[in-house]
Structures are given as structure tokens and as C-alpha cells.
Amino acid sequence: MTMAEGVAEKMAKDLGGKGNIVVITGLKGSSAAVDRDKGMKDVLAKYPDIKILATGDGQWIRDPSVPIMEDFLTAYPKIDAVFSHAEESSWGAQLAIARGNRCKDDIKQYTFDGSNAGFKAAKAGTFQADGNYTPFIADIGLRAAIYKLMGKDIAGEQAYQFPGRELVLPDSPTVVQANADEWIGRGWGDFEPTPDPCKK
């Protein structure tokens, strides 16, 4: 949720606190989609002049996001930004924007996933922000489990609201053009970003 707050704050700042946005969620009802939506809405509560025009379920992938964005573009003549829960959904939205001849509208993209391709897209200015979510966090979880099985203490663990203990880790910063070089190579995946169809 805090990751979504970071991306939403960047979006609100870029928009000067006002504008029209559309949202492409992850799989409806999934915990990550719920948290990303809540984080965004918590931030937007401070910016009443940013309007959410419509929301669609992109299911974390590209294919459903293309027709969702096409529908948004048909329904709304002024869209300032897309807040999508996954990089794949953002690439789908960009394809729809290009196909709809709306590149001139400079619709900004705010997204999540933390892939190296996404970080490269942030560096190129294709994404204005990429929530820095990494599957490598599993390494820390596995190490903690092994330490427990070995009877070792884990530095920094604390009380938890449920049975057991928790280890609270610091948030990774939102990746934007200014800090992308620092993160490229630290994300996941070895594929290249989809070229921005509006920059041919």
C-alpha cells in the first residue's frame, strides 16, 4: 500500500494537484490490487481536483488492458494520466493510446512491478513512475524461515497483530527518470521494455 502511495504522490505532483485519471487495476479482489487501489485513494483524498473518470480490471496483463483503455479513450476526451497496477497494463494502455491517435494528448503513465524493463521505461520517460516491487523479497523471507528453524534470532523482528513475529522492511523508493539508473539491473527480468508506440 505504501508503494502505491509513493506512485500516487508522484502522479499528483506531476499533475499539479488537478486533472482526470483512469485506473487499470490488477486482478479484481486480489490483495495486491486492493492495496494498490487503497494507497492511491488515500493519497487522492488530499487532492479533490484529481478526478477518477473510470476503472477497469486489467488482470495484471496486457491483452485486457488494450480494449479497456480504448473504451476509456472513446468515453473521455480529456485524460491526463493512467494509474495502472502493472507494467503490462501500462504497455497495453499505451498501445491503445497510439491506435486511438491520442499520442498528442501526452497521457502520463504511472505503474508498478519493478522489472528492469519497467525501470528502463521510467528512464526513457515512457513511465513517469514505477512502483518498486521486487520478488527478490522472497530471499529475505526464506532466510528468516531458515534462521527460525536453526534457532537463530532475527535482528529487527517485532510483535505482530497475529500469532508470531514480523520483520518490517523499509520501502524501496519509487523509480522515476531521475533515479532509474540506480535501479536498472536491480529489478527482475531480462527482457526489454516495449517501445513506446507514441515515440516512433
Image (spheres, helix red, strand yellow):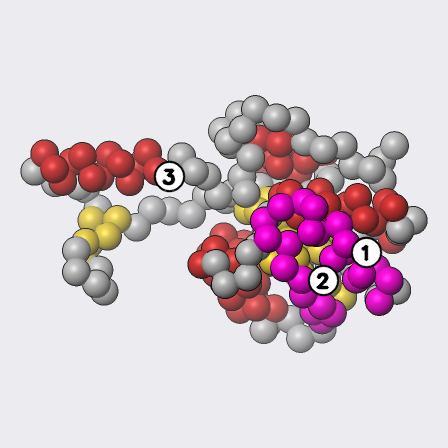
Q: Which residue is mark 2?
A: 22
Q: Mark 2 and mark 1 in contact (Cβ < 8 Å)?
A: no
Q: Which residue is mark 3?
A: 137
As drawn, 17 above or below 87: below
Along the line of sight, which residue is nearer the eye, 28 or 127? 28
**Can residue 162 be seen?**
yes
Task: Farthest residue to the left: give it.
Answer: 151
Check disc 2: other Cα within 10 Å, few if <14, some if 14-19, many if 20+. Answer: many
Identify residue type, mark 3. Answer: Ile
How far apart are the alpha carbons under marks 3 and 2?
Answer: 30 Å
Residue 97 at x, y percent in the picture: 83, 49
As drawn, 61 above or below 142: below
Q: For the point 21% across and 63% down, which residue is it? A: 162
- The stretch of residues the image draws in magenta is 50-75
Identify residue type, mark 2. Answer: Val
Q: Residue 81: say if magenta.
A: no
Residue 42 at x, y percent in the picture: 53, 69
Quadrant for the C terminus in the image: top right
Q: Which residue is mark 1?
A: 70
